[in-house]
Image: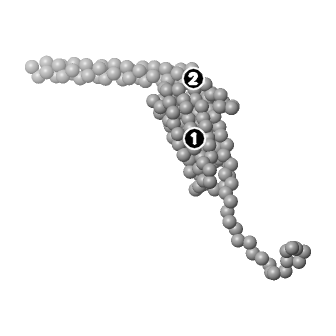
């Protein structure tokens, strides 16, 4: 009887080993198929450069950028097709992203104020884009800073006060 139990346990053990081998092969095949299909999808949609729209002529969105008088701020107004997701990025001259946000696909109008007061003088870029198009607006920030002028003396020869 003990020999029969031993044979039964060996058969169960072999069945478990066989099931594990089948699972392992299925897992490997599934992983390979997933890798092949993922690579095929990436190859089918390569990263291509976005078309830059000049004169606000994008097909899916329009942009207005206005300076707010007597401030260091600009107002961005965006109209887009509902269903389109749009990225808004503020970059410095070297391309470093200073601010990034996404306008959701459920919106068709969007407005935002950018306060540039904390940024130093320089050239900045506002890039608005979706999957295929982009609009670039360049911002040149020049602040007028009061500076103390030191006089070398009261000798103003050569200047007329009349």
Q: Along the polypeptide, which appears first: circle 1 or circle 2?
A: 2
Q: Please tell me which residue is depicted at 70% across the width and 68% down the height of the picture.
A: 147
Q: Is residue 83 left or right of residue 64?
A: left
x, y percentage for residue 91? 61, 45
Q: Is residue 145 visible?
A: yes
Q: Secondary structure at mark 1?
A: strand
What kind of element bears circle 2? Answer: loop
| Closest to the observer, 62 or 33 | 62
Residue at 58 percent of width and 56 percent of height: 118
State the quadrant of the C terminus: bottom right
Residue 24, picture quadrant: top left
Residue nearest the observer in this picture, 2 or 56: 56
121 with respect to 105 (left or right) = right
* Whole-percent x, y for residue 104 in the image: 47, 33
On residue 76, the disc is 1
Q: How many marks?
A: 2
Give the quadrant of the N terminus.
top left
Q: Quadrant of residue 45?
A: top right
* Residue at horizontal 61 percent and vertical 37 percent from the top: 64
Describe the colour scheme in one phrase.
Answer: one colour
Please give left or right for residue 88 compared with residue 142 in the image: left
Q: Is residue 80 depicted above or below 95 in this figure? A: above
Mark 2, Cα crowd under 10 Å, few <14 / some 14-19 / many 20+, is few
Does residue 3 appear in the picture of this structure?
A: no
Q: Position of residue 117 (x, y in %)?
A: 59, 55
Give the residue pinned by disc 2: 45
Please state which of residues 22 and 47 is positioned toward the viewer in this rendering. Answer: 47
Q: Which mark is residue 129?
A: none
Label 1 packing within 10 angstroms: few (<14), some (14-19), many (20+): some
Mark 1 vs mark 2, CA separation in Å: 31 Å
Q: Where, by quadrant of the figure, is residue 70 drawn?
A: bottom right
């Amino acid at each position: 009887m003990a020999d029969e139990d031993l044979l039964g346990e060996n058969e169960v053990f072999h069945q478990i080993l066989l099931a594990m081998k089948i699972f392992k092969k299925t897992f490997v095949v599934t992983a390979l198929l997933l890798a092949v299909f993922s690579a095929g999808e990436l190859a089918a949609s390569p990263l291509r450069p976005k078309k830059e729209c000049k004169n606000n002529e994008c097909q899916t969105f329009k942009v207005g950028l206005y300076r707010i008088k007597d401030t260091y701020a600009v107002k961005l107004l965006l109209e887009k097709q509902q269903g389109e997701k749009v990225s808004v990025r503020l970059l410095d001259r070297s391309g470093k992203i200073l601010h990034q946000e996404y306008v959701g696909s459920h919106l068709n109008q969007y407005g935002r104020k950018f306060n540039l007061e904390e940024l130093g003088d320089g050239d900045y870029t506002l890039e608005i884009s979706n999957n295929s198009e982009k609009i670039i607006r360049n911002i040149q920030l020049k602040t007028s800073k009061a500076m103390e002028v030191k006089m070398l003396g009261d000798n103003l020869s050569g200047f007329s006060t009349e």
